[in-house]
Structures are given as C-alpha cells and as structure tokens.
Amino acid sequence: QVQLVESGGGLVQAGGSLRLSCAASGRAFSTRRMGWFRQTPGKDREFVAAIDWSGGSTYYADSVKGRFTISRDNAKNTASLQMNSLKPEDTAAYYCAASKPYIAQYDYWGQGTQVTVSS
C-alpha cells in the first residue's frame, strides 16, 4: 500500500511561483511513475505532469509546458512540482498520484492541496 501526502499549496499572485511536494510512504517508490493532476469544482480531474520511475522521462500537459517542472528524489521518496509564471486558470486542487511498480497507471492518490492564483 502507498500513502501520499501533498504540501506546498497556497495563495499566490499571478506571475508568482509555488512548489508542491508529495511525500510517499510504502515500498518500491523508485519503481512507480509519479504524476500530478488538478481539479476544479464541476470539472473532471485533469493531467498536469508525470515522471517515470527513474526520472529520465517527464510529461506535461500543453497548458503547463515551459512553466511547470516535475521532479523526484527516490532517496527521499518524494516528488515535486515547481510551478512558475502562475496564472489564475491554474487555480485548482492539485493531487499527487503513484502507479503500481513499472505500470503507467495510477492506483494511489493523495488528498490534494489547494492552489489559488489571484489576478
């Protein structure tokens, strides 16, 4: 079983930056793909970014490319999302997700952290 705890959300002005962190407990962190998703009320959860088990490959939604950077530290069982040049439309609850070992499908989710970007 994997437990994920997000932190780092908050209120920021447009153009500002935030760094989200996801702390994972459980085994085999280095074999799991990690992802970030976001959701606003009344909308489906949407993909933001992902990083493969080794950190060698990263993936981003078009809406955040060039502004957000996903990273991981397998020694510390953490994943992070650096968010720069934030826009009001980035306002959402952000969720960390983890896959089963060596499978690109997310089975574990955190409880989310709120990011609010004011204009």
Image: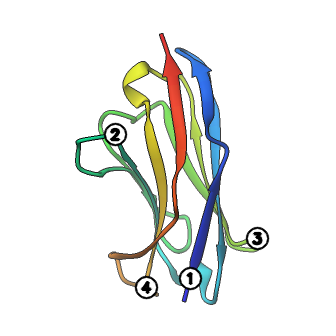
Mark 4 lies on residue: 100
Q: Amino acid at mark 4?
A: Lys
Mark 2 lies on residue: 40
Mark 1 lies on residue: 2
Number of residue marks: 4
Q: Are marks 4 and 2 in contact (CB under 8 Å)?
A: no
Q: Which mark is residue 101?
A: none
Q: Residue furthest right?
A: 76
Q: How far apart, in angstroms, are the residues tagged by discs 4 and 1?
A: 9 Å
Q: Amino acid at mark 3?
A: Lys
Q: How far apart, in angstroms, are the residues tagged by discs 1 and 3?
A: 14 Å
Mark earlier in primary sequence (1, 3): 1
Q: Where is 1 relative to 55, above or below?
A: below
Mark earlier in primary sequence (4, 1): 1
Query: Is 46 placed left or right of 26 in the picture?
Result: left
Mark 3 lies on residue: 76
Assign a secondary structure to mark 1: loop
